[in-house]
Image (spheres, rainbow, N blue to C red):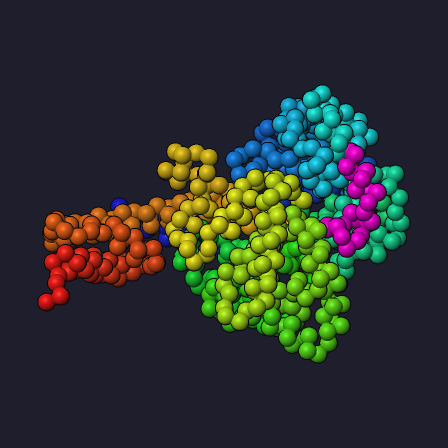
Amino acid sequence: MEFSKSFNIQALVKTIKEELLSDNNDPYSFIAPSAYDTAWLAMVPDMSEPCQPMFKNCLDWVLSNQNVEGFWGEYDGHGMPTIECLPATIACMIALKRWNAGETIIDKGMAFIEANAEKLIGEIYDSNCPRWFAIVFPAMVEMAQINGLEIIFPDRIKRVVMSMFYKREQILEREELVDRYHYPPLLSYLEALPALYNFDQEDALKHLHADGSLFQSPSATASAFMATGNKDCLNYLQTLAQKCTHGGSPQTYPMDEELLKLCMVNQLQRLGLAEHFNQEIEELLQQVYRNYMNQESWPKGTNSMATQLYKDSLAFCLLRTHGFRVSPCMMVLNYASSDKHCVFLLLHSFSFSFFAGMFCWFLLEEEVQDQIESNHEYFSGAILNVYRATDLMFPGDHELEEARSFSRKLLEKTISMGNKDQHPVPFPSFHSVIKHELRFPWMARLDHLEHRMWMEEKNSSEEKENVKHWNIAMMWTNIQRFDACRLSCLHNDKLKQLAVKNYEFRRTTYKSELEELTRWSKSWGLSDMGFGREKTAYCYFAVAASTSLPQDSEIRMMVAKSAIVITVADDFYDVEGSLE
């Protein structure tokens, strides 16, 4: 039986290595498309034939990727549509309406919104409506009306909807297109800014990235191109369409491919699967370490601040966990000693490549810390990763002490504010993850139970017992809290199967060894001596909790037996011993 389980596990490992970890795989095939951004690319008219879409494959993706319930977008960890689905669904319907396509599909989408709008936004009030939603959702409703799609909301939530429009007005009046107090800036939502909102198009184009994008946002860049005809924007969109041949656009492009790989390694570790991929993980981390030590090889300023902070802290955590000598302040010592003004300018331009040797760069400048604190909900995923990285603190790592204090303060603030989110994160269990990290010290956790936490469905006791399902929310929160990516490979069916089978194999090993140890204890009469403590299970638990499974079985049994004998001997001398 155990041989059969082991064989099945090895077969899955081989398949996953070929499908997910091969160097020949396209990293973008792992990224779950964003329905919202894909819809915006589908709206772009062809320059030579304005009555036709420029990116027909994006329109085809919209036509073929409506969920059975009638919406476009993501499910939460419990298989329910998220609030993000509302603007995504409306955007997809607008794209179809613009090209007179998919009338039946549009009707199905309208039916979904009418049936689910109250449930999805009924609990959103003016005080806690997410900033991104207050900007995007009203814009999609207005745009739908302009395109002949009248969205009717139930009377019970009309007040809530109106409060969102009012909050958008407040945001537009209060914020500049790009300022240091709000992140991400208004300009990154260019497609959602109302027609009456006055801004200088030329001034907006000054913020184009070198690749022709606005903040690596496909939707904002598509809107910028339709408004200005800018050739750099066009080149960006065409490059994106060529890269994502399946038609679906990612939420952010281009992606940091090294970050995708780091996320995969992190996921394998959290699911307890790293032992099956030691060689692949070692090779990847060796390359990351080489880049880490050589700032010229570290990606140059392509990430947002939140994404870069997430990546740097994750890289530091993984490298130090695997025994690499890394310091949270290595590179800043090299640069600060020679040109402090250069460091200041680099921070403000978000060109973080010079800080490849550390992740505590945000501590160097109060203005950066202020921006993170002002937008702590948006940065919460990156900050959580910073907090995790500080678990690996050595004596003298004073920067890590400061980073831990700073990150803990913001995470506690995030929890205290309830479920208000600054970014479309479809998983409500994120706050539970934060509470778990803050409550249980890293050194006090048991790996086997941590792995299960990332697999089990928390709301079903039957599923908890059988471990047949897992909470994808738990898996995704570590990369979903910032504008990085959605990795479809993280809920790859084979990866799910491997995680569950591996967990069950470990549990079977525990059970088998404990039963053998119990029989041994009884056969030698150690549990029937009439005095002393029965510590068979206790001793085994203490030993098994600190060793790797399924390796080292003989060592576990030998140490556990020794502990049992020592316990019996200790009790014997306590009961029968004397000073003589």
Q: Is residue 178 magenta?
A: yes
Q: How many marks?
A: 0
186 or 294: nearer the eye? 186
Left or right: where does residue 181 sit relative to residue 1? Answer: right
Left or right: where does residue 512 sit relative to residue 15? Answer: left
Can residue 250 be seen at all in this image of the molecule?
no
Q: Where is residue 165? Give x, y as percent.
A: 78, 33
Location of the C terminus by quadrant is bottom left
Residue found 51% across the figure and 51% down from its top: 438
Q: Where is residue 143? Give x, y as percent.
A: 79, 33
Residue found 79% across the figure and 49% down from its top: 187
Residue furthest bottom as drawn: 338
Left or right: where does residue 381 sit relative to residue 273? Answer: right
338 or 2: nearer the eye? 338
Q: Is residue 472 magenta?
A: no
User: Is residue 460 positioned above or below 405 on the image?
Assistant: above
Asked where in the image residue 56 lies, by quadrant, the reply is top right
Residue found 40% across the figure and 45% down from its top: 500
Can residue 201 be seen at all in this image of the molecule?
yes
Residue furthest top as drawn: 155
Q: Magenta region: which residues?
A: 165-187
Residue found 46% across the figure and 55% down from its top: 441
